[in-house]
Image: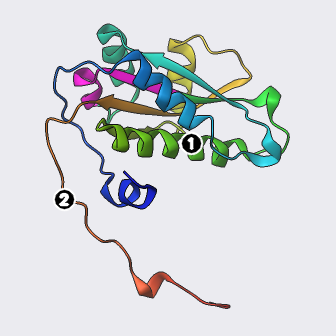
Amino acid sequence: MDTLTAIMKRRSIRAYTDKKISAADIKTLLRAAMMAPTARNAQEWEFIVVRDKNTFKKIVRVLPNGAMLEGADCAIIVCADKNKELSPGYWIGDCGAAAQNILLAATELGIASVGLGVQPKEERRAGIKKFFALPDNIEPFCVVSLGYPAESKYAPDRYDEAKVHYEKW
């Protein structure tokens, strides 16, 4: 699948089959995440791979829209090590790029995904930090839910010329 097809085809899928994602595919998703650009090449991202169903149930308590995790095969929590940050505040964009790479790579591999926001919600951040015993310097950004799709969704064309401005507003 070419890049533009993956971008145009990617949808948030919340229903999964029981099929297991291979360790090789999870590594591919993580490799894709780590190819994301970062400010000053800080590469401050860190990842927690979760496959335990009991852990998913606990994460759902912290993420109000995360019920699909209970049917997922895997979740990847995208975090930042603020001690590695070279440009303060840019970790948010850097982690967003890493998460997007996971979503797009999953689409190419035929794996369904949905990104669940943690930042900037303080109660979500605190819950994830506490549950996973994250050190003070590690900030959770999002949780990516992964599994093989048990549903499909139409991918609409969202292009809106009215939102494009050339040279000035």
Q: Nearer the viewer, residue 32 or 123?
A: 32
Residue beneath disc 2: 154
The image quarter containing residue 43 is: top right
In the rendered image, residue 88, in percent from the top left (x then y), is placed at: 81, 44
Could you tell me the amino acid type at mark 2? Tyr
**Seen in the image, is 36 located left or right of residue 49?**
right
The answer to whether residue 114 is visible is no
Residue beneath disc 1: 120
**Residue at screen point 30% across, 56% down:** 9
Q: Residue 69: within the magenta?
A: yes
In the rendered image, residue 124, in percent from the top left (x then y), is placed at: 49, 30
Mark 1 vs 2, N-terminal side? 1
Q: Is residue 127 above or below residue 8?
A: above
- Mark 1 secondary-structure assignment: loop
Could you tell me the amino acid type at mark 1? Pro
**Residue at screen point 60% across, 29% down:** 79
Q: Bounds of the magenta span?
A: 67-77
The answer to whether residue 108 is visible is yes
